[in-house]
Amino acid sequence: RELRPPVLTPAMSAVRSLLLLLAIAASSYASTASRVEVERIRDPSSHEPRIARKGWKAVGPTLPSKQIHVVVAVKQRNTEELKERLDAIATPGSPMYGEFLSNADVNQLVAPAPGSIGAVKEWLMEHGAADVEPLTPNGDFLGALMTAEQASKLVGGAYVDFKHTGTGAVISRLEAPAYSVHSSVAPHIDFVSPTITFPMKGGSRGPYKDGAEGRSLTITPEILRGMYNLTDDDVGRGDDSVIVQGVASFLEQYYAPSDLVAFRAKYRLGDAATLTDVPDPQLHTPVGVEASLDVQWITTMGDQVNTEHWYTSGRAPDSGEDEPFVAWLTDVAADDTPPHLFSISYGDEEDGVTDDYALRCQTEFMKAGARGITLLAASGDGGVGCSSMGFVPTFPASCPYVTAVGATTGGTGGESPTGESVADLSGGGFSAIFTRPSYQDDAVSAYMASGAKLPSSRNYNSKGAGFPDIAAQGLRYDTCTDAFFYPISGTSAACPAATGIMSILAQARMDATGNSTGLGWLNPTLYSLGADDVASGDMAFNDVTDGTNTYCGADDGFPAAAGWDPVTGWGTLNFGKLKGLFETL
């Protein structure tokens, strides 16, 4: 007997369709309900314009088969204890001052729970990762190669290729301003990359040929060393230097050794101390203005100090720009003997990173400081930033666990103070993410009560961490790049110059105390010395009291004032005075 399917009446067909729709809806709800949002850009409406300002343009969907190196920041433990230990290590007068931890000690202190590492590994492998590897000794960062299709399912969003209009580099990112992960793994994760954070940009500007900056003095080694009270004897030990200074370089920024030779020959500086590439060898092409500036001026002010140029791309074979800043952080955390000081001439708008990303980076900066590593970062070249929503602080300069360097101009060497004024491009202000540290309370309160004409409080977070902490000349550094000399401006010029001075101070302290470690996290010491400076008039810092940084191109940012201010910090460094103070710390 032949069996035939039942004939569906219109009513039965309608019921069947309704049940199918309900099943799809239930499945969709279950899928959504099982996911938890991990990161979201603070102001999603400005996400696309910010990407464009960085020079990135969407060019189409990422090929599903493209390999992406996915990095997961696994939640750490004991971060509050790390902060307390670092405070004790870095605060002058503390019984623990200068007693830095080993890398092994730091890694052990903040190591994630074994269950967290296991949960993240299992999650990655469930989504197709064949080989999950720890990127740091304690596994607080895990990495895995995945296809774009697999990574998309991992974070619940489609990857898009973005091309940089300047360099032509192509990266893969999510176009959306947020992403999510399965609820079972969310408690174990700080962030996943690459997702919604785009590579930082360098801060150097130039060359200038006209305008006020074009008429300012061209900075040469003799002028800058004289300005900050360094004599010909204030140099490192050459190849026997124990102190090592480093340049953090990204975004296809390489220096040409021949440019460094030409620069030092022009100014009769002699041979530099050893300059090591990390990793070695590097391409040294294309030659970048930023890398040229950093290497030439850190080795000028930190003359005869061994130097390392840390170039960081990403790890993905098809996309060398996948989250290079995170790759640099993991490289530092994994290295037992990194440089004692790093100059970081790169930055981002705080709105361009999520709170989760920024706060995890802060922990990485704390880990470095606890090991005796000093991090200096350019404060940015956009003044207080430009947005209809208010001021836009610069990351990572706004983080209290790096030393932010602003920019000055003018002044006279040999005088104390030097009479410098604000370079109005100097980034500065107050963080919207990081709360003000206690070591800043007195300095910020004094500034607020100084009588300076402050901008509207609607434009900034008066309870946030203030930056920069110090400053240096920021306009028209004579620099050789690709066999030609140009005047280069920006806080990314000020930063390597200040880092070089700090390297010589670290060497002086080492010689005086016999302590073979570096300076570590500088800020509590700088603010202590700054307060003493104001009280005694010792002039360890060249106070800057004239000028204002810009807001959307107009001089409507923060004005300089006596003592600390959020545009030049405590001012520029008087090496001759600081040397004696650092030798007795």
Image: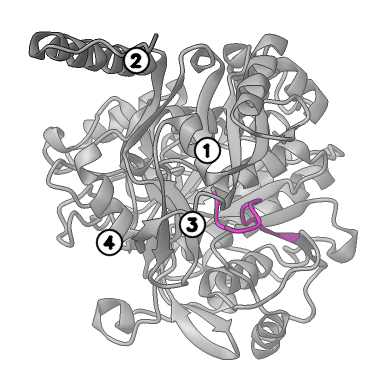
> Looking at this view, is 153 or 246 the one in front?
153
> Looking at this view, is 519 or 222 the one in front?
519
> Identity of the amino acid at label 2?
Ser
The answer to whether residue 318 is magenta is yes
Secondary structure of the residue carrying tag 3 is strand
- Marked residue nearer the N-terminal end (2 or 3): 2
Q: Tell us which disc is closer to us: 4 or 3.
A: 3
- Find the residue positioned furthest to the right: 240
Residue 158 against residue 303 in the figure, above or below: above
Real-space CA distance between mark 1 and mark 3, rounded to the nearest whole angstrom? 14 Å
Q: Quadrant of the C terminus?
A: top right
Tag of residue 424: 4
- Marked residue nearer the N-terminal end (1 or 2): 2
User: Label 3 near label 4: C-beta < 8 Å?
Assistant: no
Residue, disc 3: 171
Residue, disc 2: 27
| Residue 33 in picture, x, y percent from top left | 35, 12
Secondary structure of the residue carrying tag 1 is helix
The type of colouring in the image is: one colour
- Marked residue nearer the N-terminal end (4 or 3): 3
* Residue at (25, 78) in percent of width and height: 212
Residue, disc 1: 151
